[in-house]
Amino acid sequence: MIIDSHAHVSRSDWSSPKFLEEVIEPAVRASGEPISPVVYEGTDIPAMMEAYRTAGVDRVLLYAVAPREPKTFGRDPATREIAGAHVSNDYIADVCRQYPEQTLPVMSVNPRYEGDTVLGEMERCVREFGARAVKLYPTYNHFSPDDRELCWPIYAKALELGIPVIVHQSWTTLVDAPMKFQRPAQLDDVARDFRDLTIICAHFGVPWIEEAMCLVGKHTNVYVDTSYWATIEDPEIVLRHLLRCPRYGCTYDRILWGTDFPVSPPGPSLAIFRETLPALAAKLGLDPLPAEGLDLMLGGNAARIYGLA
């Protein structure tokens, strides 16, 4: 089973194009490539689902983006705008109802903005549409994931509901996102206090890859996903890092494949793992990623975590 553990959809009337433009522009700055029309037009859901079918992906987890305070977005001073970009839990639920054989919903909450309503919202999303996990965006929403007052009730509720917590604990190019809230090590106390809670550090903690790797090695309940990182990083660095991960206890049963769609479509992202990395290993005289480990990363681990096996 092939499962994309990290993907996004957007609506142009909810997710400010300037917000998305600000995030994506640095990634295409050096190449000079144009920014995808999806940034400005919103996600064409039928076309997205067809891309997943064509790539042979069985399931994709679609992430909500919690509401936030309006902020100023845009790198060009002449076109900046104030907006509160988000993708609602109910919209994700609606999309998943339309494509029940392909998609799984992931809710999101923002404890700084939504306050005491977050626990009730988590219960509602699990009860009403079967949310499979909750996603937190600490750096985007200006809080630390190890803030005990804001976040400990969320982790306790997730544990009660039996769902994983996914945390964007990595770099982002959004100007308003403080880098002081981005380090993977800020999940250490969380994992220490909630040893039975499944915690997924998104984007492999890029650029603090070693820190995320050691976090996984230390805590048996912590995972990482490859979204964004595997797309923007040099393939040789990706290969060498994945080969050294098991020596630190970050074994392949703890790494999830993700595209961060629309950052990468599923086909090209899968090709990195199935074609680019094996060819590179042969060229460099390195061991390839073990077939069993690759199967786990590309879907086996997600199937186990989300009860799809």
Image: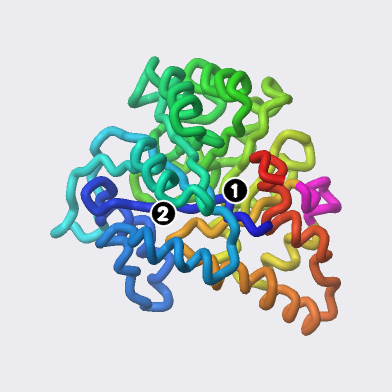
As drawn, is 229 to the left or to the right of 264?
A: right
Identified by mark 2, the residue type is Thr
Residue most toward the bottom?
Answer: 283
Provide residue 253's location: percent of width, then percent of height: 77, 49
Image quarter (top left, top right, bottom left or bottom right) of the N terminus: bottom right
Magenta segment, prevailing SS (helix, strand or loop)? helix
Q: How many marks?
A: 2
- For label 1, the SS is helix
Identified by mark 1, the residue type is Gly
In this view of the protein, which residue sits in the foreground, 257 or 35?
257
Checking the image for residue 173, the label placed there is 2
Vertical arrangement, residue 4 with respect to residue 309, above or below: below
Please tell me which residue is depicted at 66% across the width and 47% down the height of the picture.
302
According to the picture, the residue beneath numbered tag 1 turns out to be 205
Vertical arrangement, residue 63 with respect to residue 58, above or below: above
Asked whether 246 falls inside the magenta stretch, the response is yes
Please tell me which residue is depicted at 40% across the width and 33% down the height of the picture.
142
Vertical arrangement, residue 61 with respect to residue 125, above or below: below
Query: How would you rate the neighbour count of disc 2 (Cα within 10 Å): few for under 14, some for 14-19, many for 20 or more?
Result: some
Residue most toward the left?
Answer: 78
Q: Is residue 286 visible?
A: yes
Please tell me which residue is depicted at 67% across the width and 44% down the height of the picture.
308
Which of disc 1 and disc 2 is earlier in sequence?
2
Provide residue 304's location: percent of width, then percent of height: 72, 43
The residue segment tinted magenta is: 245-253
Q: CA distance from mark 2 to mark 1?
A: 14 Å
What is the quadrant of residue 140 in the picture?
Answer: top left
- For label 2, the SS is loop
Asked whether 247 falls inside the magenta stretch, the response is yes
In this view of the protein, which residue sits in the foreground, 4 or 137?
4
Provide residue 234's location: percent of width, then percent of height: 61, 71
